[in-house]
Amino acid sequence: MSIQTTTMRSDGQQDRSFVRTFFTSPAAVEGETDSAKMLRRAVQLRGMRAPDVWVPDNEDATAPSMRDDGIENIVDIVAEHGESFPGEIHPRIVWHRDRPDTRYQGLQQMLYIADPERGAIEYIDGFVVPEVGDIDDWKKADECLTIIETEYGLDEGRLSMSVIVESGQAELALADLRDEIGKPTNNLERLSLLVDGEVDYTKDMRAITPTGELPAWPELRHNTSRSASANGLIAIDGPYDDIRDIDGYHERMTTNQAKGLLGIWALTPEQVIEANTAPLPPKTGSWLLDVNGHTVELYMEDDVHIYDGERLALEKTETDRYRFRVGSEEQAVCDDELHEELLNLTDYVPSLTDIVDSMETFEEATEAGKGAIAMEQSTTLSIDGVEVSISEERMWDEATYQAAQTPISLFQDVYENRPDQREELREMYGEHVLKRAMNVG
């Protein structure tokens, strides 16, 4: 995808507000007849299998002995296929905060890729710079991109810069961005993605775990998301290297989304599909039951949500009396007490239709001069064959409405910027709901 499709705003930032997937592919594979085979496969991806950002990777994913081949492969593949690729293209070059020779190699790699005579730069949106250090090092990378733009007659800020935060220095630099972006002495407005690199971050922090697994580093993810929010950038979590553990990958994304970290690194096409779909609102709503830290999704039959498990037990003993067990604790409760207990144990996950319904209702109320309204959510639960109706009201005001806009804004961003995914979205949600979702907010 050419940068012409995803244009720079007057403040230098990208038009896209969300990036779900950051997919890296080795730029050259050693010992293969076609060393570019991984790039060739990736550039053909379409629909939900294609990432929002594709990263031909000439750093960690490519052996040092193959990096000269990798640069040539990137140019050849992007020049030939870049125009039809549906996402953005951001090659990763070599760089290191403590090694001037590596930074020089990175500059040379970018100069080679960006040469208009080679035909690739037209379809390249920017570059990914790894192993950055403090804010002065970020400025060095930015200056290299300015030199490249000047060398080839490109508009200033034409090339975006994304950095990988994989050191303590880089994490501290996140707090400096707000003071530095916009100064006339730099072009840091070109910054696009802030990407966590937990593997090298763990090494830099000299962290040790008993099993050798990576620490979760929730503080790093929070700091990256906070900096992205403060500076109008996009935060991306690092790689989840247990590529067969899709459930764990999904759980990681769910945790990230609660931090405002809506994008994640993808290492395989299967991870791309999961990362592309997970942030989207679900097609249908669902009720969850949380018992002693165990969350179960209830299944629906004839408009009744049914719990089928051993952690809860319910028996009706009299007209309005029940024996209710949660785990090993049993109590006798009346109707109102049971209702309250079940409300505390249940949560509702709204569908796209639910979110649109609520937003439209609030918009209508606002137009009628109301500042806040009550929204009711109700269902019938079945536990051990005993049916109980529960309901609760939630107040919606302008702040609630704005918070509900995030999943809708993400959906709208995907629909507008990824036309190759529109048919899958129609199949998932239906044309009527899709049109309403595009018009709300």
Image: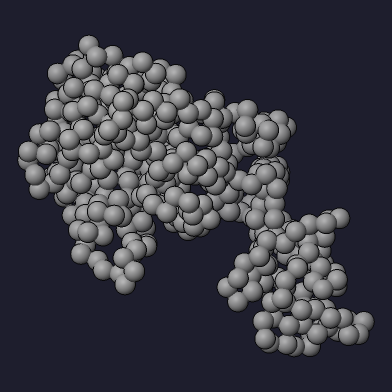
Task: Identify the image quadrant of the C terminus.
Answer: top right
Q: Is the residue 374 above or below the residue 65 in the image?
A: below
Q: Is the residue 26 above or below the residue 407 in the image?
A: above
Q: Is the residue 52 above or below the residue 316 in the image?
A: above
Q: Residue furthest left?
A: 100
How far from the left and from the top, in percent, is residue 200?
Answer: 24, 53
Q: At 82% across and 60% down in the image, what residue appears? A: 304
Q: At 78% across and 64% down in the image, what residue appears? A: 306
**Front-most of residues 138 and 110:** 110
Residue 271: in sight, yes or no?
yes
Q: Is the residue 228 above or below the residue 182 in the image?
A: below
How far from the left and from the top, in percent, is residue 377?
Answer: 74, 59
How far from the left and from the top, in percent, is residue 195?
Answer: 32, 46
Q: Splitting the image into 4 quarters, where does residue 199 fall?
A: bottom left
Q: At 87% across and 81% down in the image, what residue appears? A: 316
Q: Residue furthest right?
A: 319
The colour mode here is one colour
How far from the left and from the top, in percent, is residue 365?
Answer: 70, 46
**Front-most of residues 380 and 183:** 380
